[in-house]
Amino acid sequence: MSDEHRIGVETKPPRRIAPRLCVVYALVTLVLGASQLWAFAAARDLYPFASWRQMMAGGDLRTGGSYFQLRGTTVAGAEVSIPAAQLTDALSKNSPGLVAATVRNGSLRLRTLHPDNAALLELAGGFERLPRGARLPELLRAWGAIYNERLPPDSPRRLRAVRLDEYRWDGGAYADYQRFIESWRVEL
């Protein structure tokens, strides 16, 4: 005889959970799990500020930096700001790097060049003779096409031109961060 029976404590068989309660728990788990999966899949940058940068320190005031703003002119003639991170989800975190690399002709500095890039270098007479952003018109056209794909063909919000503006912040203070450097524009 066990110690429990000697002391006089009754042992009860394990309690069965009602089938209805199991169904409720399963539904709650599915709803919570599905909402978390949706939140993970739908996570995007909120233009113009990425969520993971909200609590970052301001950075080193001694070093400045360049940044870019993508804009477009609609068929109706309005100027609109275009958040590049919303155009290509796959590159949302890397859009600023993609633009900066394209402006400095990064794809034309690789050891193994794409045949189109090799032909462009040969046509220009070498890397030193290339203009800044030699491949930028192609990127702007692609972004303009992606933006227009999402709108009906007769929409006045469709773009007729895309423009990329480069600005420079020289550092030293949290001021004078909008010194214009250069602009690239393509008609669609």
Image: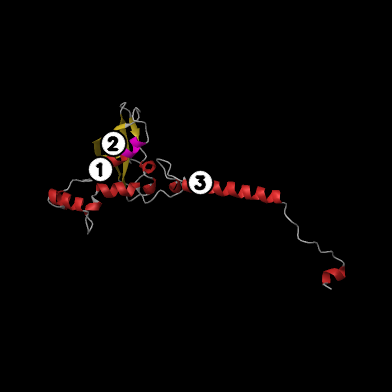
User: Dot 1: within a 10 Å radius of its alpha carbon, few (fewer than 14), some, or many (20 or more) residues?
Assistant: few
Q: Is residue 118 left or right of residue 141?
A: left
Query: Disc 2 residue type?
Result: Val
User: Is residue 153 shown above or below 105?
Assistant: above
Task: Give the residues drawn in magenta, as a range.
Answer: 145-149
Asked if residue 120 shows in the view, the reply is yes
- Disc number lying in front (1 or 2): 1
Query: Disc 3 residue type?
Result: Trp
- Inter-mark Cα distance, 1 to 3: 33 Å
SS class of the residue under badge 3? helix
User: Residue tagged by mark 3?
Assistant: 38
- Inter-mark Cα distance, 2 to 3: 32 Å
Give yes or no for residue 181 being in the magenta stretch: no
Q: x, y (%) of residue 135?
A: 23, 46
User: Dot 3: within a 10 Å radius of its alpha carbon, few (fewer than 14), some, or many (20 or more) residues?
Assistant: few
User: Residue tagged by mark 1?
Assistant: 138
- Inter-mark Cα distance, 1 to 2: 11 Å
SS class of the residue under badge 1? helix
Q: Give the tally of numbered discs.
A: 3
112 and 134: which is toward the camera: 112
Q: Earlier in the sequence, mark 1 or mark 3?
A: 3
| Quadrant where the N terminus is found in the figure | bottom right
Q: x, y (%) of residue 7?
A: 86, 69
Asked if the residue at tag 2 contacts the one at tag 1, i.e. Cβ–Cβ closer than 8 Å, the answer is: no
SS class of the residue under badge 2? strand
Q: Residue at x 29, y 41 (%)?
A: 142
Using the image, tell me which numbered label, if any, was put on residue 162. Answer: 2
